Image (cartoon, helix red, strand yellow):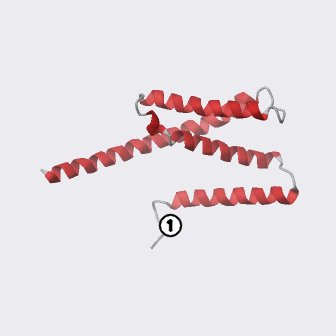
Amino acid sequence: MKLVNRKNFISVICVTYTVISISLTIINILIEGEMNSTQLNIFTCLLLSILGVGVLSQHYRLERFSPLAMVIIQYLAAVAVILVSLKAASYFTYVHPGGYRDMVISFSVPYFIGAVIYYISLMMEVRRQNRILEKIKQNKE
């Protein structure tokens, strides 16, 4: 049995890279005893990626809305989480006044690219499933 194939090759690379990067960063922090700004950025990217994927994965809960409304609701929910988290962090560390805007922009660009890819993939999967259902219906007749 092959665990890595053509269909999951890129996913396996991405997961492997992420696990290695995060593990090495954690080990480096433990050895040095402190976290530098690069390491903080790595964890921030990880958290923002988790947030983006988490929000997109909940699209089925919003199916009663139009696709545009669904995308807007998901985006606003993610940005709200970011802003609330940044506000909470501001009680423990200094956040530059432009930091809120910068964080939203840093999240928005990759989020919208990922959302476009996600929803195109979702539409293609729905079409594929519909074709399969049509073939099943034709075979029953």
Residue sitting at the far left: 141
Which residue is at a point 64% across and 58% down the rendered structure image?
A: 17
Residue picked out by circle 1: 4
Q: Position of residue 44 (x, y in %)?
A: 71, 43
111 or 34, which lies in front? 34
Image x and y of residue 112, in percent: 55, 36
Q: Residue furthest bottom?
A: 1
Q: Is residue 32 above or below residue 67?
A: below
Residue 6: horizontal and vertical position, in percent? 46, 63
Query: Quarter of the image holding residue 111?
Result: top right
Q: Quadrant of residue 45?
A: top right
Q: Is residue 135 left or right of residue 84?
A: left
Q: Residue at x 56, y 44 (%)?
A: 53
Q: Quadrant of the N terminus?
A: bottom left
Q: Callout 1: few (<14), some (14-19), or many (20+) C-alpha neighbours within 10 Å? A: few
- Comparing 60 with 5, the one in front is 60
Q: How many marks?
A: 1
Q: Could you say where residue 75 lies in the image, as x and y percent from the top left?
A: 56, 32
Disc 1 marks which amino acid?
A: Val
Q: Is residue 120 above or below residue 67?
A: below
For mark 1, give the secondary structure: loop
Residue plotted at (76% across, 57% down): 26
> Which residue is rendered at x = 50% and y = 31% of the image?
71
